[in-house]
Image: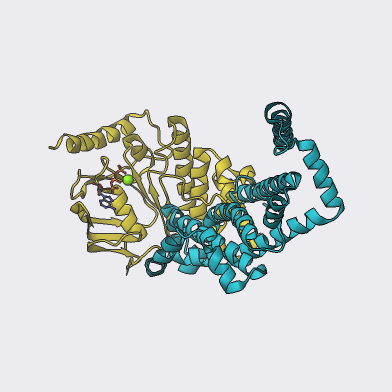
Amino acid sequence: MALVSLDGVGKTYRGRGGAWEAVRDFTLDLAEGEFFCLLGTSGCGKTTVLNMVAGFEPPTAGRILLDGREVKGPGADRGVVFQGHDSLYDWLSALDNVAFGPRLRGMGRRARRAHAQRFLELVGLAGQGGKHPSELSGGMKQRIQIARALANDPRILLMDEPFGALDALTRATLQGELSRIWAGTGKTVLFITHDIEEACALATRIGVMTRGPGGTLKAVLPVDLPFPRERTSDAFMAVFRRVHALIHEEMARP
Amino acid sequence: MNGRAATVAGYLAGFALLFALWHLAATLLVRSALFPPPLPVLERAAALIADGILQEQVGASLRRILQGFLIGSAAGIPIGLAIGSFRPVRALLEPWTEFFRFIPAVAMITVAVIWFGIGEESKVFLIAYTTVFVVVIATAAGVGAVGRDKIRAAQCLGATRLQVFRLVALPATVPYILTGMRLAMANSFVTIVAAELVASNDGLGKMLWDARLFMQIEDIFVALVALGLLGFATDRLFRLAIRAFAGRFNPTM
Ligand SMILES: Nc1ncnc2c1ncn2[C@@H]1O[C@H](COP(=O)(O)OP(=O)(O)OP(=O)(O)O)[C@@H](O)[C@H]1O
Ligand SMILES: [Mg+2]
């Protein structure tokens, strides 16, 4: 059985400007342990899909199941890494940010800090736990977000362009580390990006969305390349070209 | 800590400059018995302190400010939190805050004296009155300004509504609350002087009033300088508290 399944999911926003159908008839099954990259042009509805899976917003059509149960709202079984880093708590140290989930479940101070320390090590920030978010670089903040989500041991990790605001070098480094962490933990990941190379480097499957309004899945491609990915290899380039062609077809569509 | 030493040195230099300019203005520019230079004022202050009079007046004013301020804050913070958190509460209480906001405490002095007499109660009431609305508005604004992602992050880490409030909304609002209290404290100084000028048996406002009646010009300046220094000191304390809570430093790991 699929870990997460989206079944004919649609979302129509109703606001002052009238109704806007952002997502239409979106159907997808995510298997346990896979790394799924959702790729699409700006405004095609990627964040909308992720927000519905996270439970932040209800779908207006279809339904979303997690382990066979319908998603009704946000919950600890789905960890989220946000695009910006406003989600970190400025008044807590990096370590206490990572320990926040266990704290909610009533874990004692010592135990949860020891627990959080392990996840800081996992994201390569072992010695930086005492710093506050305002004292961390953009890349470090995203590492903290990843550690915070993982420390809570969710069934699936939902990531909305987590590296979108980083410089190219930092982004490549973090992609490598995320890939290593994913391989080590076996977590299921739904990763949103509009960077084709990023998707090809990380994903076991890539879903390409159509352009909005009414964004939906245009195609799903399995990526059967070994990790770590060799970005200059012919096989990698071949995948890149196929995805590139799909995206550009969408961009060229009137 | 070097930065702090530099700040203190800067402040001292700033005050020295202020007194120097005052001295120059009084001795060279104005040269009137109505504008004494700083030295006789400081001498008068020393005499008043030696007699215990200045401490008494300062103590009377400060005690009223502190009582009213604490009552006003204690009422204002929960009301502001409720307004910021619950729409119906906001709809119900917004007319109150927006109505009373435009009736300054100074305008309430007459009713306060009629209701509570010229004793402590009327002053404490006025300070509490001036404090509560400022704190309510700042607190409610703080709750409204908590980032959406901060709340969502807690929700998908498994937080209950109460946990979101206690562990996210509340700490994120603390800097706003402190800023509101800082503003309210400044207003309290205005209010206490006005109230004591009009109706009081002691306090800095009363000291100003009596000094005017008996043309003790130095006493007026002693009271003014005391007000400025007290206000400056309390405001610095609030700034320090705000900075500590804003989380730029890591107090405890
Ligand atoms: N709260 C909202 N109310 C109304 N319309 C919205 C809302 N959120 C998103 N939309 C619209 O839905 C469409 C999809 O938005 P979404 O944020 O999902 O796009 P996206 O694929 O994540 O884009 P990007 O890559 O730029 O982040 C857009 O046209 C957007 O204007
Ligand atoms: Mg988006």
Q: What residue do we see at 32% from left, 59% from top?
A: A57
Residue nearest the viewer, comparing A242 with A21: A21
Name the quarter where the C terminus of chain A is drawn. top left
Q: Position of residue B97 (x, y in %)?
A: 44, 63
Compared to residue B135, the image places residue B4 above or below, namely: above
Q: Position of residue B108 (x, y in %)?
A: 52, 64
Horizontal relation, residue B213 to residue A230: left or right: right
Q: Position of residue B153 (x, y in %)?
A: 45, 56
Give the chain coloured cyan: B
Residue A101 visible at all:
no
In which image quadrant can residue A19 be found? bottom left
Residue nearest the viewer, comparing B179 with B242: B179
Give the chain coloured yellow: A
Residue nearest the viewer, comparing B184 with A172: B184
Q: Quadrant of ligand 2?
A: top left
Q: What residue do we see at 24% from left, 35% from top?
A: A242
